[in-house]
Image (cartoon, helix red, strand yellow):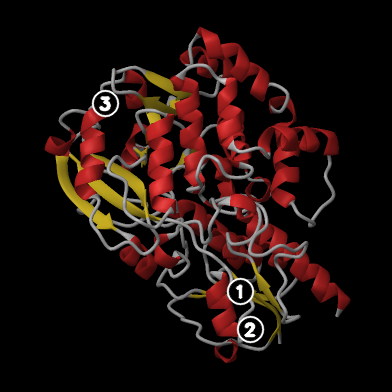
Amino acid sequence: MLDAVVVGAGPNGLTAAVELARRGFSVALFEAKETVGGGARTEELTLPGFRHDPCSAAHPLGINSPAFRALPLERYGLEWLHADLPMAHPFPDGTAAVLSRSVAETAASFGPRDAGTYRRLVSPFLPRWDTLVRDFMSLPATALPRDPVTLARFGLAGLPPYSWLMRRFRDEPARTLLAGLVAHVMAPLGGFATSAVGLVFALAAHARGWPVARGGSQSLSDALAAYLKDLGGLIHTDYEVKRLDDLPPARAYVFDTSPTALARIAGLGTAYAGYRYGPGVFKIDYALDGPVPWTAPQARAAGTVQIGADSTEIGTALRSAARQDRAPDAPFLITVQPGVADPTRAPEGKHVFWAYGHVPNGWTGDLTDAIERQLERYAPGFRDLVLARATAGPPELAARNANYVGGDIGTGAASGLRLLLRPKPTLFPYATRHPAVFLCSSATPPGPGVHGMSGHNAAKAVWRRLRQT
């Protein structure tokens, strides 16, 4: 009998399997797709030689993850590559605010009236970042805080909605860039703890940047898989699990799946009947004949570029997607241009590029024209560079990855208390009513993102259980 079986080879499932194998437990991992990766894959979606990341591409949480940093992933081929700027947010007049490794450069891009406010906001936390991120991403009960004072201070700044934090800034460059950071979790700006989201992304960039993985996000997944194999773990791909009886006998079963899929497979009935999924996304992967012709020079040097004219436009787009009524006319866009840091991703002189906008969960329309209208506002002539595009709305995203229910790439709504209390209000979010079944996906704390910490935290709960039996 195995000690643990893990279902789902996304970053969290791979991390959970690695953490258990590192501690001497026998582990087997089962993945429905032909390759490991989940939300961290790389594929030729458009033309030969153009290597796209179907979901996550830039990794501010990955390079800062306490779980990943404790593993020898560089030994297995993972290499982080950095653009000159982690992120830029251009405006229609050709200017831009930036999120730089330098706090001073970032603050200066906000203008003189907000520069000091921003420095005062982030300065107390940056010197204690490594401890803070470990404490924050280990909540609620997998470890005692190492620096409870800093964590409490962060809570005071981060628990209010971003609509409150925004009032501290007087001009739109700061308000808009930070609103865009909050929007990465697809939560309306007035939601509980949304200030914390913006702060985490900003601090992550200042601490270690927003890199891409050389060769694509698949490199991160492949490094985790190779390390797991060296630890004696077994990986079975192209193996769909429909019920527990499909799996070999084990002392524990760990699911990197959506909560509703877990309930169906493990026979947990209505255990997650009230679980809510958030807005979906509409994503386009492009093969381009050259770099994106951004008007703002800062955007040409950035790995990630946010698109939203101002905080009002971003807030309207988020509310439209969350209300489930219609896709926004002017969608807020998150875009990544990996070739700025990694020219190996496309043939010489060519580029890969992706953009996505938020849409209602399960939306079946086509956002291509709206996305490209937005891009043309900030990069005139963009359409002329398009060699090929691969579009994916909520139905296509859910077909690629069963965790993306209705196109929700965060595997669960991040509005209100659901941002912190996932998948339900409990101090033991990784455990289920079945004593041998656990959940480790991004439906559990600390939530969405390629960081492996949900898997790391779940593995702690599993090995504590195994040592008691």
Q: Which residue is mark 3?
A: 294
Identified by mark 2, the residue type is: Leu
Label 2: element kind: loop
Q: Calculate the distance from the C-alpha at mark 2 to the C-alpha at mark 3.
A: 51 Å
Please tell me which residue lies in front, 342 or 374. Answer: 374
* Residue drawn 50% across the image and 85% down it: 242
The reply to whether callout 2 and callout 3 are in contact (CB within 8 Å) is no
Quarter occupied by the N terminus: bottom right
Q: Earlier in the sequence, mark 2 or mark 3?
A: 2
Label 3: element kind: loop
| Drawn side of residue 443 relative to residue 344, left or right | right
**Nearer the camera: disc 2 or disc 3:** 2
Q: How many marks?
A: 3
Identified by mark 3, the residue type is: Trp
- Tell me the quarter of the picture where residue 408 sits: bottom left
On the image, the x and y values in percent for residue 141 come to: 80, 56
* Residue drawn 85% across the image and 80% down it: 469
On the image, the x and y values in percent for residue 95 come to: 34, 17
The reply to whether callout 1 and callout 2 are in contact (CB within 8 Å) is yes
The numbered mark at residue 272 is 1
Label 1: element kind: loop
| Drawn side of residue 192 relative to residue 306, left or right | right
